[in-house]
Amino acid sequence: QVQLVQSGAEVKEPGASLNVSCKASGYTFATYGISWVRQAPGQGLEWMGWISVYNGNTNYPQNFQGRVTMTTDTSTSTAYLELRSLRSDDTAVYYCARNGMAPDFWGQGTLVTVSS
Amino acid sequence: QSVLTQPPSASGTPGQRVTISCSGSSSNIGSSPVNWYQQLPGTAPKLLIYINNQRPSGVPDRFSGSKSGTSASLAISGLQSEDEADYFCAAWDDSLNGVVFGGGTKLTVL
């Protein structure tokens, strides 16, 4: 069965970077893209961008450009999210999701708390 | 403030039919398929409906989706207590060149 397993919760200081991993199994990793979506406490969903596992192409929304990098490692079927220059309003649960016709299977989420 | 507009809450009694609306514009719902997600408390979102009205394997046919112009709707018939969750709509936005979500609708089963 399709599974996406993310790395564990993190606490970061303002100005630091977060790195979240997302290990996929149960399907051919390179045939789907990976989207990243975050959810601030008690809030809705915010799309952070997408990466093609096949060729590494990325698409980041304007509000994250310059601060986010998405990568994949096909040898380990793992996707990575890096977000730099963290602020308190980056506190959220970060999700990876397999991108078929839509983000379909989601990871369990990684809580990232930004606090001094 | 979300690009797609959903009512913040909805409610119904067991067995009832409820609908949740999602309003957008010509750059998103008007030109792209709509997807719906269910998020149970403390869990990751789950794809409920894709391409306006398609159900992934395992999703009961009590859930149905529709789209007309720049609006979409999710209907849940035969409401059950386990349907109590947050529901989000999503679509691609050509102007923003990205995925946009609705703010979510909290469904309460009375």
Image: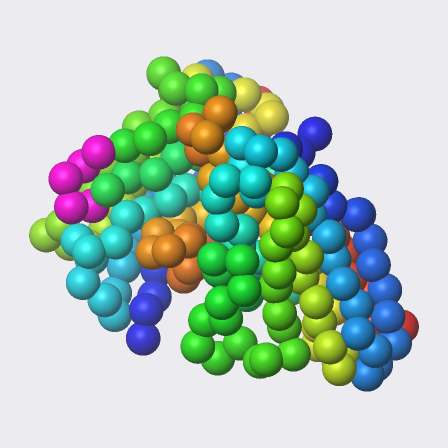
Please state if A7 lies on the left or on the right of B77 as rendered: left
Residue ID at (22%, 33%): A57
Left or right: residue A70 compared with residue B76: left
Q: Position of residue A85 (x, y in %)?
A: 43, 17
- Asked whether residue A38 is in view, the answer is no
The single residue placed furthest to the left in the displayed view is A75
Quarter of the view holding residue B18? bottom right
What x and y, as percent, mark residue A51?
Answer: 28, 39
Q: Is residue A93 above or below residue A2?
A: above
User: Residue placed farthest to the front in the image?
Assistant: B69
Which of the pair A67/B58 is nearer the observer? B58
Q: Is residue B3 above or below residue B49?
A: above
Residue A45 in the image, given as x and y percentages of width and height: 58, 43
The quarter of the image holding the C terminus of chain B is bottom right
Q: Residue B64, relative to residue A94: is it above or below?
A: below
Magenta segment, which residues?
Answer: A53-57
Residue drawn at x 67%, y 46% as measured from the top left: B71
B9 up-or-down from B32: above or below = below
Q: Tell me, yes or no, whether the highlighted magenta stretch contains residue A23.
A: no
State the image quarter where residue A71 is shown.
Answer: top left
Residue at x-position 50% and y-position 34%: B93
Q: Quadrant of residue B24?
A: top right
Q: Main secondary structure of the magenta part?
A: loop
Choose between A27 and A87: the one closer to the eye.
A27
Query: Which residue is at the front of the view, B94 or A110?
Result: B94
Instruction: Please give left or right for residue B16 compared with residue B28 in the image.
Output: right
* Residue at image location 50% in from the left, 40% down from the top: B31
Number of marks in the rendered image:
0
Q: Quadrant of the N terminus of chain B?
A: top right
